[in-house]
Amino acid sequence: MIKAFIILAAFLSGEAKDVDINTKASTIEWTGSKVVGKSHSGTLQLASGSLDISKGVLKGGSFVVDMTTLEDTDLTGEWKGKLEGHLKSDDFFGVEKFPTAEFKTTKVKAKGDGTYDVTGNITIKGITESISFTSSLAEAGDGYEASASITIDRSKFDVRYGSGSFFDDLGDKAISDEFTLEVKLVTSGAGS
């Protein structure tokens, strides 16, 4: 659905160290839905990334999502291919022209118990907006696992197809402006 390179770049303090993200172990799952009724879900793959971690504390990071890997997981056959093609088209994320989306942190605030308030700038289809979400960080094997549920308003990024923000009288064909990304980032090491 989304061809995105999302970059979560560092807001560094102290002696944070970039720790590479294991792209094979990390996951991104997306969900989009109509205003009334059916939703669709799928996956995206990470291309690269790192987290900035100091003494077990998240300071920031960056990750890149390969939007060409956009896949629907709730349909099969012809309908699956049609939906994936439509989501990659200019009607939605225009993956050919905009193969990446970026997220850069501007602030990371520890809340305690391994949770953080994260704020930053996300760029999709060449348009940049500020977003905020809650993230968690926990030890996982010899590294860490960071996870977040990120809600994005597609209408702010000129993704207009089926949007009630741009078109009247869509009725039950209206598609929600918001979609969610469930992101799990697994690091290859433990940082400093």
Image (cartoon, rainbow, N blue to C red):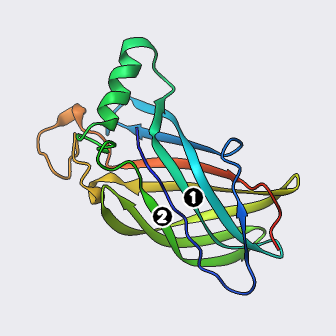
Q: Amino acid at mark 2?
A: Phe
What secondary structure is marked by label 1?
strand
Q: Does 105 appear above or below 15?
A: above
Q: Does 187 appear above or below 169?
A: below
| Residue pictured at 38% horizontal, 21% vertical | 81
- The residue lying furthest to the top in this view is 77
Q: Seen in the image, is 80 located left or right of residue 170?
A: right
Comes first in the chain, label 1 or label 2: 1
Marker disc for residue 63: 1
State yes or no: discs 1 and 2 in contact (Cβ < 8 Å). yes
Marker disc for residue 103: 2
Q: Seen in the image, is 151 located left or right of residue 83?
A: right
Q: Seen in the image, is 96 located left or right of residue 66?
A: left
**Toward the viewer: 50 or 186?**
50
Check disc 2: other Cα within 10 Å, few if <14, some if 14-19, many if 20+. many
- The residue lying furthest to the right in this view is 142
Res 36 → quadrant = top left
What secondary structure is marked by label 2?
strand
C-alpha separation, residue under disc 1 versus residue under disc 2: 8 Å
